[in-house]
Amino acid sequence: MSFPCIDKLASRTQELDSGPEPSYDKVVTGYELFEHKQPFLLDHGGILPNVTIAYETWGKLNSAKDNCILIHTGLSASSHAKSHVKNEKPGWWEDFIGPGCPIDTNKFFVVCTNVIGGCYGSTGPSAIDPADGERYATRFPILTIFDMVRAQFLLMDHMGIDKLHASVGSSMGGMQSIAAASLYPDRVNRLISISACARSHPYSIALRHTQRQVLMADPNWNKGFYYKGIPPHVGMKLAREIATISYRSGPEWELRFGRKRAQEDQSPALCPDFLIETYLDHQGERFCLQYDPNSLLYISKAMDMFDMSASSVKRLQQQLQQNQVRVDEIVSKQGQNTSVELRSLIGQTSALEQTKVDADDERVQNNTSNDNNRKRPLSTLSATDPATLDLIEGMKRIQMPTLVLGIQTDLLFPVWQQKEIAECLRAAGNKKVTYYELDAMFGHDTFLIDRVSVGGAIKGHLESKI
């Protein structure tokens, strides 16, 4: 039996061994750069000596600077949400942004960033560490969704934007939009969360864990230090295939592929044979050199840790405040060139040094391990359930008009999680919560595809009178 799929991977590895190192920040072009030249403290104690944020804009900022919409991206998306003069390639939300579109650039000034931890221009594991001129790799500190949002608001400060018309996000972007509304309730006028969650649930954590394990098992990953060698393209390909299974839905695949094989007249093979297999193989192959593997590890871990429960948020805030005092002392004494000293003082939490973080997470999980209610829709929970009350308390700062949108076929962020967001906000006192639930066949990726239904809900919320 022949194995052309394995031969192809071996051939790709050989090509990469002799070819140039992938330049992930060149995959996307035409973005602007904002540089924050001061130390940036992260929730779990890590410190970035400075932060660069890649961003793109559409439309015009009005004189009052109150028509800005901040779009938050999903895990692997770049700042290129919409085509423009500097980059005419279609963006990942091309049909949703523009004149007369759901996010109307005749009315709004739209900003989209590449999150920190990413690889499309913003500071991430593939960026250069100014302390030694080498790439951070897995020396990069563990980061959170809240860290990403605080960095974005540094950009807003730089632009002189005190208040957003709306914070809008889908998938991980929805996590960011919720975090932004909670961190800066006086600076966010409206909130839109699509196919997201208020806290990651075990199924989604398990899926992302499996992706990371497959990636890290690739020998070329080399504990994250692969930048001068062969990138772990096999691990990335397989991780993307696992992810793709969670992005789309069974009904769509039944309609598109059914049980059809690529070559019906040939004997079955162990390499991709069914059309669904060839589709997954193509998706993995297309992605494996387009995104930095370390960014996938760090950002997916940040998604796992996301939890808007009051106890979780409070713990992060206390850590941040305690470490900030110590950082301020060092900076005031020694100036800005203190990256090495700061790291040694706070104790940078890297991907290879996360024992304390994992232990904290385990204690939280153990405290609620017998609480099966966490996995059920809020409408079925007891009003005295401790975990639910904790989440409601954590959402109390979010009182602006809010749109929550879910998809019935979503496997990654099930529709009950969208109900949980909406009902927790209402229980926390928000009287302006709109909840939509779509019966679409595209699963989690519906927010990228269904311009009519998703776009219509967005446009209605953005342009409604408060």
Image (cartoon, rainbow, N blue to C red):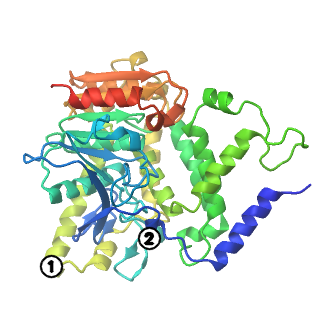
**Residue 161 relative to residue 243: left or right:** left
Residue 255 image offset from top left, x and y in percent? 66, 27
Q: Where is residue 104? Give x, y as percent.
A: 26, 38
Neighbourhood count class around disc 2 (C-alpha, 10 Å): few under 14, some 14–19, many 20 upward: some
Q: Left or right: where does residue 299 sit relative to residue 384?
A: right
Residue 284 is labelled as none
Residue found at the far left of this picture: 64
Q: Is residue 319 visible?
A: no
Q: Nearer the viewer, residue 409 or 340?
A: 409
Residue 302 drawn above or below residue 330: above
Residue 456 position, x and y percent, is 34, 27
Residue visible at 26% across and 35% down in the picture:
191
What kind of residue is marked 2?
A: Arg
Say which residue label 2 marks.
139
- Taking 271 as reference, is 419 above or below it? above
Asked if residue 240 can be seen in this view, the reply is yes
Q: Residue at x 21, y 58 (%)?
A: 154
Residue flagged by tag 1: what amino acid is it? Lys
Please state the horizontal and vertical placement of residue 216, each as a whole percent of the image.
60, 61
Crowd around label 1: few <14 · some 14–19 · many ≥20 (10 Å): few
Q: Quadrant of residue 1?
A: bottom right
Residue 407 versus residue 351: which sits nearer the camera?
A: 407
Q: Disc 1 marks which residue?
A: 333
| Quarter of the C terminus within the rendering | top left
Q: Mark 1 and mark 2 in contact? Answer it, CB < 8 Å.
A: no
Q: Kindly report the distance in space between the C-alpha atoms of the residues bearing marks 1 and 2.
A: 25 Å
**Quadrant of the image occupied by residue 417:** top left
